[in-house]
Structure formats: C-alpha cells, structure tokens
Image: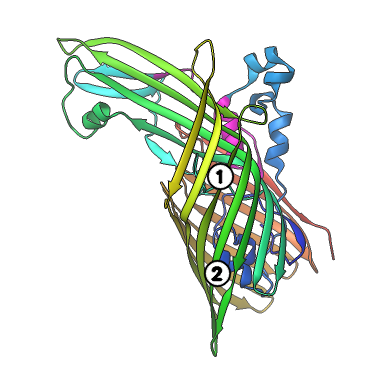
Amino acid sequence: MEAFFPGEFVFSPYSATTVRPQPAYEFFNPAFAYLREEDPFDFGPRIPLGIAAIFLFPERNPLLYFTDRDLFDTRFDLLSFYDQLRYPASVLINPGRSPQEVIVGIEQETIRVTTGDGRPLLFDDVSGASGISRPFSPLVPAPLVSYHHRRKDIYSVTGVFLASTGHSLKPGDNLRGVLEGDPVEPDTRYEVTASASAAGGVSQSLSYGITAYGENATVTVAPRVVGYYRFFTAQARIQAGAETDQENLPAGTDSRQSLFLSHPGNGWGSGARLDLGTALARDRFRAGVSILNILGVDTVTGTITDGNVEDEPTRITTVGPAPAATLSASYQVPLKTGALEFAVDTLLSESISAHGGVLLVRRAFMFGLSGGYKGGYEGTVTAGVRRGRRRAALSLNVHQSPFVQDVVWGIGLHVRVRR
C-alpha cells in the first residue's frame, strides 16, 4: 500500500500484509492519516491486478452470464470468483474451486460434513478482503482506488471499492450439539449453511484529527464518519442437510441453493458509520488502536433467487453498533545503509486475524516478509528497488482457500513512476 500525500489519487487494495501505523493504512485507523513522516518502507502503490484477472479468466468472470451464457455455464466457478475478490491486489495462479457438492453424512453415531470427494469442510465465519468487512454491514471493504485530501485537521477520502465481504460455514443447532459431543438423535434433521458475499460501490469519509505534542512523542485522536453507496451486492448460500429415521439410521439428504443479488435496475444499497482511532508516535515506536462502526446503519434492496418461478424482492436493514477493532504496532531499527522494521497487527471483527512482518531497506533494495492468519494462513514476500521516490517491486502471496483450505498462490506488482 502506498504512503500518500494530500490531493492525490492512491491505489490501496488490501493484501496479505501487516497493517502498519502509517498513513497508507488509514482505512483501518483514521488517526494514521495524521502521521506525516515519510515511510522509508513504502514499496509504492500496489496495482489491483486481481480485478483485471476477474475479466481475463472465464472461471472468475461473472459477466459471462450476460455475454456468453454457454461459456459461463461450463467454466465459471463461484468460489474462484470469490477467492479472487478476497485478494484484489494479486493475480491468483490457482484460486479456490467450488466443491461439487456438500454432504452431511451420518455414520455410526457421528456426523461428517465433507465435499463430494470426501474432503472435510472447515466451520468458520471469516471477514472479507480488508479483514474487517462484513456482508450487509456498514463495514464495507477498503477502496481499490481513492482520492485523499487534507485541509488543516480535516481529512477526506473518496474511493471505489469492489471486494469480498466475508464467507462462512455454520452448523445448525442440532448439528452444533453433535459436534460438541451430544448423541445423534432419531427423527432429527441436521443442517449446515455455507455462504459467500461480495460488494462494490463508492465511499466517502471525513475525519478530524486532534494531536497532542510531547517532548518525544505525539498522540492523535481522530473520529471519522464514513458514508457509502453500493452499486453491487451479492450473497450465495447453500444449505445441505441429512435426516435420521426412528431407528436413528440415515433417512436421506438434500441441499438448497439461493442467491441474493442487488445491482442497478435490481436494487441498491447505502449506509454510514462512525469510527474512532488513536495513534502514538514516540521515537522509533508507533502504535494505534481503533474501533470501527461504533454506530452504523446499512440498508440494501435486491432479489433472492432460490429456484422459484419468480424472484423474491427483499430489503435488508441493519441499525446499531456492531464494532470491529484494530490494533497495530511497529518498531524501526536504523542501520548504517538502511533500516529495519518489525510490525504486528490484530483485527477483531466477527472473526479474528493477526499478522506479523519484517521489512528491510538496504541502499536501493527493499525486502518485506509478512505472515498471519485470517480464516486460514496467509503470507507475502516482497522484493523491490527504489530510486528517489520511484519504486518497483514484485510480491509472491500464498493463502488457504475458503472452506477446503487448499493452498493458493498469487503474484502482485508495486509501481511508482513519479520522481
């Protein structure tokens, strides 16, 4: 992500890197926008190549539904599309693939939830691409492209976002009891629900920074208001179930699918939220804590398709606090011909993610290593060169795909050409 300056367009897609107390990460903490020292570890803007990949590969391109229905029916894979939206800054080499079916199997007083080829599925509820975004929530994704402007203590960010907003695999109440040790009961239905969501739109934020200066430290507090309008919202859901008979034997399985879809001409979405961030800068140490969505409102209209003859118009509204929290810290070590930095972060939403990273600058060369957990393990290795303010770098990313935890690789690119 790029360290920016007022009145500038910024590429800022989220990637599998550590959130550092720097202005480039102000999406996670509004107080970071007021840390104005230049970042020596800035690799330059990360180009959102993953969005281009969506339209280049049929497996990830949902627009084929409108332009080439036959190719869509034979090639498009919903999980590949969703996995690419989780990492919009990288071209995924082997994105996750949707299981052919989800099976709830009853075997000798136990229940197993697997894919059609027998692989176990992971129960989880994972936030979206930015690590905090949620479906049908004011916690929208970080902008892919944004315009930043500061006037005195007021900071403004206008951006466009398109990314995943989370996925989950949840057992029903009866199945949850069995997974926790209860016996399998006769004449009972056991059910599991899988979902994956994404959203796209425009957002506008305004923050106000209050900074206290000490002898060797500064403390900044910054409230922020975020408003947004969604052009696109989607959530795919699959419910699979199995039943037992009076003798506690399997009595059949079934599955149901549904799709919520909102787009121009078929619905809309909008909302707003209140955030609060704090940041501390003391010599080579920086840290920040923020609470996002202290209070928020979100509404979206669209249709639900579940195999019925007619789509069902639907409105979903969320009002009230549903906060997410972020914590991050870094420490820099000066070297004779460069610098070294250690950084850590924790993001708390419906799920918990945490990362750690090491960055090194030696003369004209830059290196970065970051790893952590966000619904699965993920990591990034970055290497690049710098000359003045010019930057060029390549990154190699790895993460575990949703639900089945396959290993997925991706490639990212950082470029800055201005002097």
Q: Earlier in the sequence, mark 2 or mark 1?
A: 1
Q: Residue at x 40, y 25 (%)?
A: 119
From where the camera sits, is residue 396 visible?
yes
Badge 2 marks a residue whose secondary structure is strand
Badge 1 marks a residue whose secondary structure is loop
What crowding class fits label 1: few (fewer than 14 Cα within 10 Å), some (14-19), or many (20 or more)?
many
Part of the protein shown in magenta: 78-102
Q: Quadrant of the C terminus?
A: bottom right
- Asked if residue 91 is positioned above or below residue 321 in the image, the reply reads above
- The residue type indicated by label 2 comes to Ala
Q: In this orientation, which residue lies closer to the viewer: 183 or 373?
A: 183
- The residue type indicated by label 1 comes to Ala
Q: Position of residue 237 (x, y in %)?
A: 46, 26
Q: Which mark is residue 129?
A: 1
The answer to whether residue 181 is left or right of residue 352 is: left
Which residue does the numbered mark 2 point to in the structure image? 222
Q: Residue at x 61, y 52 (%)?
A: 381
The answer to whether residue 123 is left or right of residue 262 is: left
Q: In this orientation, which residue lies closer to the viewer: 355 or 192?
A: 192
Q: Position of residue 23 (x, y in %)?
A: 63, 66
Q: Residue at x 51, y 58 (%)?
A: 274
Q: Quadrant of residue 121?
A: top left
State how far apart marks 2 and 1 are (Cα). 24 Å
The answer to whether residue 304 is left or right of residue 174 is: right
> Residue 93 colored magenta?
yes
Of the residues tagged 2 and 1, which is closer to the observer? 2
